[in-house]
Amino acid sequence: MATAIDNKSAEIVAKYRILFDLKEQQLNGQKSHPLQAIRQQAIERLESMGFPARKDEDYKYTYVTKIAKQSFSEGTGSIIGENVVKAASFGDMDAFQLVFVNGVLNQELSNFDNQMDGLTISDLKTAYDNADTQALVENALTNELGLNAFVALNTALSHGGTFIHVSKGTAVDKPIHLTNITVSGGSAIMTSPQILVVAEESSEVSVIETYSAINDGTYFTNALSRIMVGKNAHVHHYKLQNESLAAFQINNTIAIQERDSTYSSYVLDLGGKTVRNNLSSHLQSSGTNTNLYGVYLAKGDQHIDNQSFIDHAHPHCESNELYKGIIDDKGRGVFNGKVNVRQDAQKTNAFQQNSSLVLSNTAQMDSKPQLEIFADDVKCSHGATIGQMDETSIYYLRTRGMNLEQARSMLQFAFVAEVLENFQLESVKEKALAMMKEKLG
């Protein structure tokens, strides 16, 4: 049953209903396609729930309504050069590459046609029209619509989305790189990247999402990733975010794990004015492993908020979470990690740690690790540390010939580089380290 929302929220939502209606009018013959009915359901769900306000506990440190209330037009494709795509790539790493410019797939710059046996990469409409995958797509798009307002908004306005299907027993021999590039400037635009990854039993795949911009304009990226990890499957999921420093990004990632599966998330957040990451993993059977690794660097007036949720619902499962960040100038960081161990989840091993360096008197960091345990035979730990630079270590490096700036930069780099050592793809790790060095100066 729909719940009433206040007039202010309803007024904000109404702007997105107008965008939805305009988009629907441009569909022509596709208006009757079943996917449009799902999008209609999504916009109606948004209208019923509204956008979260500061009174909502999960959003009290990040005022996302200030993003939603702005006026955005829908992104359209733009012409960029191959040099821009190359700069966002990973050296000589061979990959299936999909390039999205302002949220629209650029076929000429993409390279994913020569797909291997057992791998299918397509848009969601093509996947829905296939009888073998129709139910997968429909269930994935409808099951989490009520998770939060931005999931519903993405589903309603996405440009079709990307479907990645890995068949049973298939190990994809090269990563799949989704390159998202925004050409900012002029009117503020909104893009809605959406991916659905289905890794069948005993398969393995690496998926990389990168976000970058041409120019430092204002825009809004509302991204959604759904990851379905089958029995004994392994999914490595990378996200490297280096948006414009005037941009906003909301990123929702939902992982569903079956028996004996492994889902590993690797996140690097460098750009964006206001960034909010919602990452959840649902362990739906025994023997599952979940690894969440994240690095965030907030300088100037950047605001980076990481929210994670790991749901241990069955016995003999393990999760590891390590997030580290550096906050400087007037930047602000937020971390809220929740690990839920249900009553039946005996023999669970769960580790969670968040550590941050706060380098100025005007920087802020709010950390809230949460561990809720309803089982009695478990090994679980969680913790958070917030501190400043170690003056003794700085002094030691200066006695070895470094100046003050060099010593501080080296210690900062070493602090967060520990997390990046968990990145499995060497080319991605090297790129992440280079991006981080540039950010740290």
Image: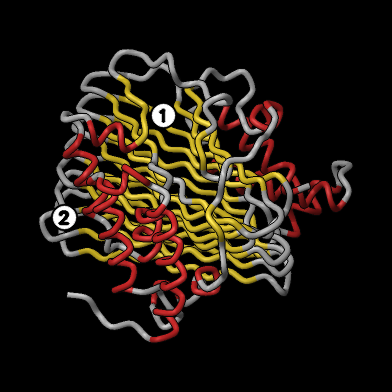
Q: Nearer the viewer, mark 1 or mark 2?
A: 1
Residue sitting at x 52%, y 66%: 334
Q: Quadrant of the N terminus?
A: bottom left
Q: Which residue is mark 1?
A: 206
Q: Is residue 62 above or below residue 223?
A: below
Answer with the quarter of the image where residue 168 lies.
top left
Task: Point out the tag, 1 or 2, that comes first from the N-terminus.
Answer: 1
* Mark 1 crowdedness (10 Å alpha carbons): few <14, some 14-19, many ≥20: many
Instruction: Give the side of residue 312 with respect to residue 89, left or right.
Output: left
Residue sitting at x 19%, y 36%: 134
Residue sitting at x 19%, y 46%: 139
Answer with the quarter of the image where residue 85 lies.
top right
* Residue 294: x %, y % from top left: 50, 48
Q: Amino acid at mark 1?
A: Ser
* Residue 353: x %, y % from top left: 44, 56
* Residue 293: x %, y % from top left: 46, 45
Quick one: SS at disc 1?
strand
Spatial CA distance of label 1 from label 2 is 33 Å
**Foreground: 13 or 403?**
13
**Foreground: 430 or 19?**
19
Instruction: Give the side of residue 179 with respect to residue 225, left or right.
Output: right
Q: Kindly tell me whether residue 290 is visible in this rendering.
A: yes
Q: Kindly tell me whether residue 326 is visible in this rendering.
A: no
Seen as rendered, the residue at the extreme front is 28
Residue sitting at x 45%, y 25%: 175
Residue 377: numbered disc: 2
Quick one: SS at disc 2?
loop
Q: Is residue 116 above or below residue 82?
A: above
